[in-house]
Structure formats: structure tokens, C-alpha cells
Image (tube, helix red, strand yellow):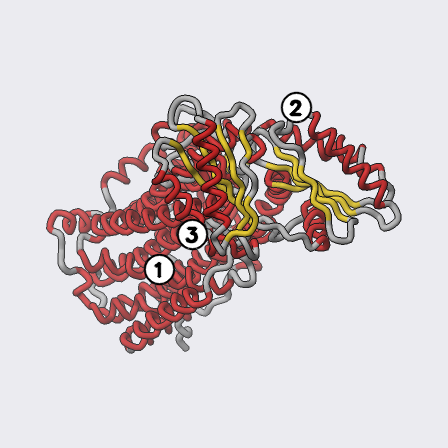
Amino acid sequence: MSAKPMVTVRIARWSALHPWRAIGAWFLFVIVCVGAGAVVGTKTADFDDNPKGELAVYQQIIDDANLTRPATENVLITARSGSLDQGTAATVAAEVRARMAALPEVGEVGEPIPSPRGSAILVSVDIAGDRETAEDRLRPLLDTTASIQAAHPDLRVEQVGGQSLNKAVSETLGNDFQKAEFISIPVTLLIMLIAFGAVIAAGVPVLLAMSAVGSALGLSALVSQLVPSTENTSSMILLIGMAVGVDYSLFYIRREREERAKGAKHLDAVEIAAATSGHAIVVSGIAVVVAMAGMFVANDVTFSSMAIGSILVVLAAVIGSITVLPAMLAKLGRWIDRPRVPFLWRLAARSNGEPRFWQAVLRPSLRRPGVALALATGALLALAIPAAGMNLNSPSDADLPRSIPIMQSYDRMTAAFPSTGATHAIAVRAPADRVAQTEAAVAELSARIQADPGFAKDRAPEVTRSADGRIFVIAAAIPDNATSPGSDRSLSWLRTTAVPATVGAVAGAEFAVSGQTAGENDFIDNMTSALPWVITIVLVLTFLVMLWTFRSPVIALSSILLNMLSAGAAYGVLVLVFQNTWAEGLLGFTSTGGIVAWLPLILFVVLFGLSMDYHVFVVSRIREARQGGLDTRAAVAKGITTSAGVVTSAAAVMIGVFSIFATLSTIDMKQMGVGLATAILLDATIIRAVVLPSLMAVLGERNWWTPRFLRPRVAPVSARHRQRELDPVG
């Protein structure tokens, strides 16, 4: 009795026999996802989402206070050169007040405030209505400021505030996303052309990857109503989606072409590709999803939103690859290899066998595996050493590129008015029977803040009181950006000394210190405590996936060790590049002296997921050769060389897409792009060409040891059937 075909084969057969149904269903799915996401819109996370610890206490007090906190913009008036003419500046400030007050979108307009040195005048403008929707009413204010600036070209009249900064950041990120999308598609197409040598074959993987990205963006907008999205979620979906979407199609199409070249009929070739590469895609998808799910352990909206986006796009890519791709291959037939690009077609044809280049590269590693393993491992460990000095920080708006015009305005404003920069916020709830005592303690705390050199001197701390008189909110401005050492020192002084010694001395009083600095520091602490758990869970789950796939504890364990080696080396490169200044001009960034706090965790889980893309493929080819009767060293050589073309192309796609992100504006995207591109480059070269073959050669037959409980119980079958049944991946 013949074995029942695996699910991927049954799906491929149905799709190949009903191609228009499969293609139509897929594109209907994509259109529905994109349309639903556009209608619902994306809910974006803000500072108040998912607070923990002291920040949660602060948020609860603020919510109970029911304070009206309007969104505030600032209009800054400065001289373009030389000293500021006070009379002219006062006249312009009066015009700003009058014209802003006349707008229905404006609430209160503050009195003009001169800077301590007389170099600027500042007018604060409150946006009327709900703070959460203030950006919707921002445009008339910006237009008014621009109109006044046009009427007074000898002065600088600039608008800076939370909403205008958010708008500029959103536009920058949107432009970056479009830039990444615009560049990644032709880069990926070029790599696919080199890999296949034919235009249609090159276009199909890119089309499927783009459709997976589009559907995931739509689905993520729907999910964001439950788990708010962050500013990096869309970039993460594009980055992961283009990488895995193209790679999955690449594996499938190359295997189908390989089987046709061996003489298989078209439908048979599709089914064989489904049984081998199709199954490998499912295994790889599971590995990526498992790794990404590790981010949920951090219990933070930043990680949760990126995990959801990544999981959605991977699942979309897997589903598309095992359903619509067989249908497209069946419908296209041999047209998949048309039109051929003459030189590239011959180049691609030569790479389908066992390339001489890779035979030459592997020869030293297999001839003296112990020496090769020691040298390569030593080099990677040396690259990883700088990671021990990694500093974590969280870039703020103040760390955005100065090529953004509003950031230049921000610098001028904070230089003239230090109190308009970062702010620490203290919330205090008085016991019902100690309101007067608490009020006196708040006044003492304000006096201490005003006297401390770590706080801005151009404006006294602002105290807001709730309607019932029991809740006080103190805004203490600092003359530093939110991520500077000075802001850390003043936060520590508040939390450990000033607040406990004043309001903390009132029995029963509740208090908490918040603000961007507090939020970023607490985020780093949370991430640092969560990282060991995330690493442990990802390692265990990845081990189980590899054990289930290959039935070999040695293969599973060695896969994890190799990934950890490349991840450590990538961490080291990140520190060398971004914690120093030598690469600033090359990559267009200003060093913050650290690595973005969320990046080590993201880099770890993404690398562990994506490296399984081709690691499963390579090792399964090695096992296939071993089961064919070759000894371990010969099987390693055959498996790596026969898979060299497709694996090199897959790695090139990832490196190409990730490298594009190193050209974007924000430092977090630059660091993620460099980190992932470095890890994949090391994984696809040193790991695959030296460490993996030398390690497997040293281990020899121990690679294939299978515990009794993992050994499959199968009836005797033909050699070819048995090979496919035991080796459904590759």
C-alpha cells in the first residue's frame, strides 16, 4: 500500500490542475487584506501604551486626575544673522499671537517669552480639542507660520512642537519606506535575473513577495486595533517579507527546474518540488514564526507589534509559495524560462551543477577540518569580542537626522530655551486627610528642582493640579536631550533622592516619575531582563524544530551553535560601527554612543528564523547525499556544492534587502540593516563554506545519530520512494 502524499504535494497537485482558481483566490485574498487595512487604518502605539512598574503608577494617577492636557506647539523667532532686533521680533510675535488666536483650531496662545540671552522669542500655541487627534488640526497652524515667515524673510519664524515633530517623523519614515520599497524591488529583480537568467522566472518570486508584503500590511492594520503598531512595524514587514518571500519562491522554482532538467514531466516536477522544497518552505516558515514568537516574551508593545508583523508576512509568504506558486508554474510551463537573457542564462545554467568555485573553497575545510574549524571559529569569536562592551540606548526625536528641517529648528529652540527640550514628569496623589501637607511637599520639591543644576533655568517647574485638589503633576524641564547622561543623572536624583525626601515623606502619598527618559530607561531595563528568557525560549523551540526535521540531536545542536556564532559576530560588528565615529560619514549617521535597545533581541530572533531558510535546505541536501551511499565528507561536499547556486542567491537577496535599510534616515533602521546584512553575510560565507563543513567532517558519523524514540517506523519501500519519504526537505 503506497504512502499518502504529504500535504504540500496534495495542495500543489490541486493548484496545478486548477491554476486559475488558485491564482484568482490568492489575488482576491491580497486585495481583501489590502482593502480592509486601508478602510480600518493603522492604530499606532504611543508613550502611554503598555506601561509597566513606575510608569504604570504614573499613568494611573494621570488617568484618575482627568486633566485636560492640550497639545502645544511653539513658534520660535530668531535672527538669520547677527543679533535679534527686539522691536521687530516683538512686532512679529504680536502678529503670531493675533493670527494664531484667530484660528478655530487654536485654543490658548501664550504671551511672547524672550530667551535669557535675548537671542529669540517664543510663543506657545495650544491646539484646541482632543490631544490624541491634534495632528489632524495641525495644518492651519503650519500654514500660518509659513505665511508669517514669508512676510518677514529677514527673520526665522519656525514652528516646533510635539505634533509637528511627529508629523515630520511620520513623513520621514514614510519616505524611507517608499525609498526602501523602490530600491529593494529592482535590486531583488537583478539578483533573480542573475540566478535564473530569464525574465519571467526572475519576476515571479518578486511578485509573490510583494503580494505577501501587501497582504501582511493590510492584516497588520487590522491587528493593530488590538495590539497597536509602532513606527518600525511596516519597515519590518517589508524587510522580512521581501527576504523570505523571494527565497521561498527561489527554492521552489529552482527545484522544479532541476527536476525538469532530469527529464521529469511538468506536473511531476511540480509535485517533486512540492515534496522537497515545498516541505522545506513549511519547515522554514515554522522556524521563523517560532523565533519571532519569542518576542512576545518581552511583553512590550514594540516587540509584540514587530513580532505580529513578521509572523503575518512569513505566513503569507509560506501560503503563497505552496498554493499559488505551483499554479503559476503549471500555467506558465516552459514559459517560465522566457525570455532568456543570453549571458545570464548561460551563467545560471552553469551554476545548476556542482560549481568548481565551491569545490575549491570547500577543499581545505574538508582536507584539514580540525584546523579550518579552529581558525574560522577563532575569527568569528574575535569579531564578537567588542559585543561585550555594547551600550544600549533608545534614540529620541532629538537623535533624528539634522537633514530634516524641523530638527534644525528644534536645535535652535532648545539652545535658546533649554526648558523646551526633554522633561521629567512627576505625578503625586495626596491622601484625603493630608492634602495640605502634600501641597507643601510639592512646593518643596519644586524649589529643590529649581535649585538643582541638572534642570533648565529659563522656566520654573510647572505644577498642574486636578479639580479635586488631590493630584499634582510637576513638569521639570532639563537642558539635555532625553537620552543624554545628564538626563539620566537628573532622573536618578529625582527617583532616589528628591521625590522620596519630599512627597515620599507624606504618609500614604502615591508618587511616580515618568517622562521620555524614564520610559526609555525602564524599557532598557525590561528588555535586558527579558532577553535571557527570549534567547532561551528561541533556542529550545528552534532545537525542537530542527530535531523534528532531521531526527538528529547533533544536527539540531550544531545548527543552534552556528547561528549563535554568527549572531555574536554581528553584534561585535554593530558595536565597532555604531558605538564609534569612524563610519559616520560612510553611512550618514551621528553616533549616539550605543546600540538601539530593542535591536539585540530583534536581531537574535530574526537571524535565527531567517538562517533556517537555507540551513534546512543545505543540511537536507547533505543528508540526501549521505543516504545515497556517500561517506560524510563526500556527502558534505556534494550537498553544499549542489545547493550553492540557490543558497547563494537566497543569501544575496537577504543581504541586498537588508543593506538598503542601512541607507535610511533613522539610526535604528541603519543599525538593523547593518546587523542583519552582516549576520547573513557571515552565515552564508564563513559559516557555510568553512565552519559547517569542517564541523560535520570532524563529527563524522556522529552527525546522523538518532535516538530510538525518534526513529521512524516505515515499511520497506523502493530506494527512490524511501529517499523521498525520509528526506522530504531540500
Residue 453 is marked as 2
Look at the image and tell me in which quarter the N terminus lies.
Answer: bottom left
Residue 139 is marked as 3
**For mark 1, what is the residue?**
277
Q: Quadrant of residue 570?
A: top left
Category of crowding for the residue at label 2, using alpha-carbon neighbours closer than 10 angstroms: few (below 14), some (14–19), many (at least 20): few
Where is residue 608? Give x, y as percent: 48, 47
Tag 2–tag 3 contact (CB < 8 Å) = no
Q: Amino acid at mark 1?
A: Ser
Category of crowding for the residue at label 3, using alpha-carbon neighbours closer than 10 angstroms: few (below 14), some (14–19), many (at least 20): some
Is residue 78 visible in the rendered image? The answer is yes
Tag 1–tag 3 contact (CB < 8 Å) = no
Look at 38% across and 53% down and name the residue there: 238
**Sequence-earlier tag: 1 or 3:** 3
Q: Amino acid at mark 3?
A: Arg
Q: Is residue 289 left or right of residue 509?
A: left
Look at the image and tell me in which quarter the C terminus lies.
Answer: bottom left
Look at 40% across and 24% down and name the residue there: 582
**Sequence-earlier tag: 1 or 2:** 1
Marks 1 and 3 sit apart, C-alpha to C-alpha, by 52 Å
Where is residue 31? Give x, y as percent: 35, 69
Q: Amino acid at mark 2?
A: Pro
Marks 2 and 3 sit apart, C-alpha to C-alpha, by 38 Å
**Sequence-earlier tag: 2 or 3:** 3
* Front label number (2 vs 3): 3
Question: Dot 3 lies on which element?
Answer: helix
